[in-house]
């Protein structure tokens, strides 16, 4: 989602795909929450990893993250930041953007091509003390009236009853007709097998090293701008190596899903100071050391390329 007034004031183009958010023009204008702090953000990260593949997906995520203004402490912080103009663009689950727009904020929302359509769930807790009331609520939620209520401007969830879309305005997303929402055939088992590993990787490489990633990204962007139209092989080679270092991931896709390895990551951390198991801490420290070295070296190489262009 993006703030239309902000975009106009900063003369920023409207993005369409994930790769657009990696362009230099968006540097310091993008916000997102960490997947370890938001289940819906985790689904977005996982959709990119599944839709683009492990290595390319992380390369895309890091390239976008290098343009971050902030990683918010909670998922609601992203639409709040875009609504207020604290930053121009935010990576959000659809109902954040749709409800803000419907409520009158100067914002717009767009689905990238690589998108997963993941249904929300509702259930009754086993041995619930008010099971009859809970059942009545579920029945209401799935009724014609309840489904229509999901389209309230403050909610803007996509109903599961196709008939509910008869009253929606033209252009409103409809998963049953028209343009398909979601090109990723989301693999739930794959997502579950590496859930905490993905969260830890994102935090180590992006959340807790955002300053260094942002610095390396900016240096690379400046070098690429100077190199445009240049045939200086040395400079181009330095830039390519800098980009490789930034995109490097310390774990392969098969390792991330390995049950024995994934079992080490049992802690869902909310902040950097949260304690984790000794083995998890050891692995994350190794990741952090390698990541920091890569980002610092990438910055050095990009600045070296700029100096000879």
Image (cartoon, rainbow, N blue to C red):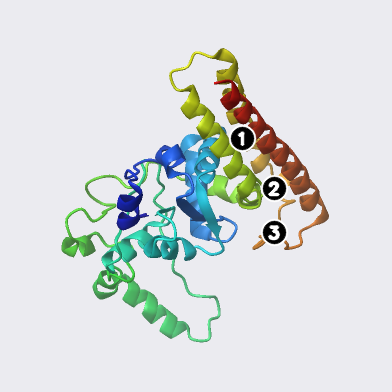
Circle on res. 220: none
Residue 272 in picture, x, y percent from top left: 69, 59
Q: Quadrant of residue 96?
A: bottom left
Q: Which residue is mark 3?
A: 272
Residue shown at 65%/48% (left/top)? 209
Q: Secondary structure at mark 1?
A: helix
Residue 151, quarter of picture: bottom left
Q: Quadrant of the N terminus?
A: bottom left
Please report contact status of discs 3 and 1: CB closer than 8 Å, yes or no: no
Quick one: 95 or 116, which is closer to the camera? 95
Q: Is residue 125 left or right of residue 209?
A: left
> Which residue lies under the disc numbered 2?
262
Q: CA distance from mark 1 to mark 2?
A: 24 Å
Real-space Cα separation, disc 3 to disc 1, in angstroms: 21 Å
Task: Answer whether residue 58 is visible to the viewer in this image.
Answer: no
Callout 3 secondary element: loop
Q: Which quarter of the picture shows residue 247?
A: top right
x and y, in percent, of residue 169 in the image: 18, 60
157 lies above or below 193:
below
Give the foreground label among 3 and 2: 3
On the question of residue 129 being in view, the answer is yes
Q: Closer to the camera: disc 1 or disc 2? A: 1
Measured from the top left, where is residue 131 in percent x and y? 47, 82
Say which residue label 1 marks: 246
How many numbered marks have been drawn onto this rendered protein structure? 3
Count neighbours of disc 3 (C-alpha within 10 A) and say few if under 14, some if 14 to 19, many if 20 or more: few
Measured as percent of width and height from the top left, residue 256 is found at 65, 42
Q: Quadrant of the C terminus?
A: top right
Q: Looking at the image, is 96 positioned above or below residue 233? A: below
Q: Residue at x 24, y 71 (%)?
A: 144
First-in-chain label (3 vs 1): 1
- Circle 2: element type: helix
């Amino acid at each position: 989602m993006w703030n239309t007034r902000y975009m106009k004031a900063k003369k920023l183009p409207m993005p369409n795909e994930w790769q657009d958010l990696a362009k230099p023009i968006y540097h310091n204008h993008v916000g997102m929450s960490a997947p370890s702090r938001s289940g819906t953000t985790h689904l977005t990260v996982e959709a990119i990893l599944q839709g683009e593949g492990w290595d390319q997906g992380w390369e895309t995520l890091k390239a976008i993250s290098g343009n971050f203004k902030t990683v918010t402490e909670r998922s609601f912080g992203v639409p709040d930041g875009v609504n207020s103009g604290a930053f121009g663009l935010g990576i959000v689950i659809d109902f954040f953007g749709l409800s803000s727009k419907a409520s009158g904020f100067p914002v717009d929302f767009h689905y990238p091509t690589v998108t997963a359509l993941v249904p929300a769930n509702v259930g009754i807790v086993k041995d619930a003390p008010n099971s009859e009331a809970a059942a009545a609520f579920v029945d209401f939620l799935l009724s014609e009236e309840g489904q229509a209520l999901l389209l309230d401007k403050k909610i803007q969830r996509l109903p599961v009853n196709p008939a509910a879309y008869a009253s929606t305005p033209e252009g409103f997303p409809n998963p049953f007709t028209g343009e398909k929402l979601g090109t990723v055939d989301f693999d739930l088992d794959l997502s579950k097998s590496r859930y905490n590993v993905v969260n830890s990787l994102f935090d180590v490489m992006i959340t807790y090293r955002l300053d260094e990633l942002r610095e390396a990204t900016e240096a690379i962007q400046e070098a690429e701008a100077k190199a445009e139209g240049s045939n200086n092989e040395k400079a181009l080679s330095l830039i390519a190596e800098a980009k490789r270092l930034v995109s490097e991931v310390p774990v392969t896709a098969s390792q991330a899903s390995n049950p024995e390895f994934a079992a080490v990551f049992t802690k869902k951390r909310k902040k950097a100071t949260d304690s984790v198991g000794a083995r998890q801490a050891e692995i994350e420290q190794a990741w952090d050391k390698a990541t920091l070295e890569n980002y610092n070296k990438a910055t050095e190489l990009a600045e070296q390329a700029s100096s000879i262009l």
